[in-house]
C-alpha cells in the first residue's frame, strides 16, 4: 500500500514544493519576520499536502480517462504508471487526493481564522485549481499554461510568505512572479512527449494547439522574460541586488534552448532536455534563496 501511495503522490516531484516554501520562508526571514517553528512546519505540511493532492488526483483522472495507457512514460511525463500496473488501487489514489485536499482546506481555514480571512482570496481558488486542473483546465490552452505557475508561484509561494511574514509586499510578488514563470515553463515542456496521447483524450494544451516548435518559441520567450524581470525587480529595489546571484544559472539556458529546438519534434530525444529544464527550475530559485541569505547577513548599506 505504501508503495502505491508513494507512487501516486509522485514523491520525487515534491522537491518543487520544498524549493517554493524554502524560498518563501527565507524571504520572510530577510524581511525580519519571526514566525514560530510550528507555523513554518504547518505551512510546509500544508504545501506538501496540496502538491500530493494535485498529483494523486492527476494520477486517478488520467487513469480513468485511459491516458496513462497511451503515454510513453519518462521520469518527467506520462504519470508514475502505478495505477496501470495495479488498476485495483485506483480508489486508493482518489482517497489520497481527496484526504490531502481536506487537510489543506482544514489547515487553510485554521490559518485564516488565526491570521486573516483575506487569506481565503488565495486559498479558495488554490483548492479549485487542484481539483479542476486535470479534468477541465487542460482543455483550455492558456489556462493550462498559467495554472501550474499560478498554483506554485501565486498560491503556494505567495500564500506561504503572507502567512509567515504577515503581509504581501513587492518582494513577495516579485518572487512569486519568477517562480510562476519558471514552473509554467516546466509543465509546458513536460507536455511535449504526450501530445498525441493527450489529443486522444480531449486535452488542448499549447503543444497540441501550436505544435511543439511553436511551443518551444513560447517557452523561450517565457524563459527570457524570467531573467529580464529578475533584473528589473532588482533595479526597482523590490529584490536585493544579491538576488542577481540567480544569473549564475544562465549557463544552463543556452544548451537547454538549443537542444529544445533541435529535438522538439523528436520525442525520443527529449528526456535529457526535460531533465535539464527540471534542474534549471530548481537551481534558479535555490540561487535566489542564497542571494537573500547573503543579503540578510550583509550590512544595510550593501543590500
Image (spheres, grey):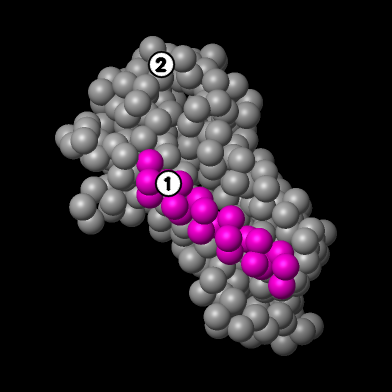
SS for dot 2: loop
Point out the stretch of residues depicted in magenta: 94-114
Query: Of residues 87 and 50, which is closer to you in this image?
Result: 87
Residue at image position (70%, 52%) is: 122
Indicate whether residue 97 is drawn in magenta. yes
In the image, residue 240 above or below residue 20: below
Magenta stretch: helix, strand or loop mostly = helix
Residue occupied by mark 2: 201
User: In the drawing, does residue 271 fall left or right of residue 111?
Assistant: left
**Circles 2 and 1: CB atoms closer than 8 Å:** no
- Quadrant of residue 110 within the rendered picture: bottom right
Q: Is residue 269 magenta?
A: no
Q: Relative to the observer, which residue lies in front, 282 or 204?
A: 204
Residue visible at 59% across and 76% down? 39
Tell me: residue 89, above or below residue 119.
above
Q: Where in the figure is residue 267, as x and y percent of width and height?
A: 31, 23
The image position of residue 232, as x and y in percent, is 76, 53
Q: x and y percent of residue 46 in the render?
A: 53, 62
Is 120 positioned to the left or the right of 246 in the image? right
Q: Secondary structure at mark 1?
A: helix
Is disc 2 surrounded by few (<14), some (14 to 19) or many (20+) residues within 10 Å? some
Give me the disc on residue 14.
none
In three-dimensional space, the C-alpha distance between marks 2 and 1, rounded to whole angstroms, equals 21 Å
Q: Residue at x 24, y 40 (%)?
A: 89
User: If the image is split into quadrants, where does the C terminus sit?
Assistant: bottom right
Amino acid at each position: 500500500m505504501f508503495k502505491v501511495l508513494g507512487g501516486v503522490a509522485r514523491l520525487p516531484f515534491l522537491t518543487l514544493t520544498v524549493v517554493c516554501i524554502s524560498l518563501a520562508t527565507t524571504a520572510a526571514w530577510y524581511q525580519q519576520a519571526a514566525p514560530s517553528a510550528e507555523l513554518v512546519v504547518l505551512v510546509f505540511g500544508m504545501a506538501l499536502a496540496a502538491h500530493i493532492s494535485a498529483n494523486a488526483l492527476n494520477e486517478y483522472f488520467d487513469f480513468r480517462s485511459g491516458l496513462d495507457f497511451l503515454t510513453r512514460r519518462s521520469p518527467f511525463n506520462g504519470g508514475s504508471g502505478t495505477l496501470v500496473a495495479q488498476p485495483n488501487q485506483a480508489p486508493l489514489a482518489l482517497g489520497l487526493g481527496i484526504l490531502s485536499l481536506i487537510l489543506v482546506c482544514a489547515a487553510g481555514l485554521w490559518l485564516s481564522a488565526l491570521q486573516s480571512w483575506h487569506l481565503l482570496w488565495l486559498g479558495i481558488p488554490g483548492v479549485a485549481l487542484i481539483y479542476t486542473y486535470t479534468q477541465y483546465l487542460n482543455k483550455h490552452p492558456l489556462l493550462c499554461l498559467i495554472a501550474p505557475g499560478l498554483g506554485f508561484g501565486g498560491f503556494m509561494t505567495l500564500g506561504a510568505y503572507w502567512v509567515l511574514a504577515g503581509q504581501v509586499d513587492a518582494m513577495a510578488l516579485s518572487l512569486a512572479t519568477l517562480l510562476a514563470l519558471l514552473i509554467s515553463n516546466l509543465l509546458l515542456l513536460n507536455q511535449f512527449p504526450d501530445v498525441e496521447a493527450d489529443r486522444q483524450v480531449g486535452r488542448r494544451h499549447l503543444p497540441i494547439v501550436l505544435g511543439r516548435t511553436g511551443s518551444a518559441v513560447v517557452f523561450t520567450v517565457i524563459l527570457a522574460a524570467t531573467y529580464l524581470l529578475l533584473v528589473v525587480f532588482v533595479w526597482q529595489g523590490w529584490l536585493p541586488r544579491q538576488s542577481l546571484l540567480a544569473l549564475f544559472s544562465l549557463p544552463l539556458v543556452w544548451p537547454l534552448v538549443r537542444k529544445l529546438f533541435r529535438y522538439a519534434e523528436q520525442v525520443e530525444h527529449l528526456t535529457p532536455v526535460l531533465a535539464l529544464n527540471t534542474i534549471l527550475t530548481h537551481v534558479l530559485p535555490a540561487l535566489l534563496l542564497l542571494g537573500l541569505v547573503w543579503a540578510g547577513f550583509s550590512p544595510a548599506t550593501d543590500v
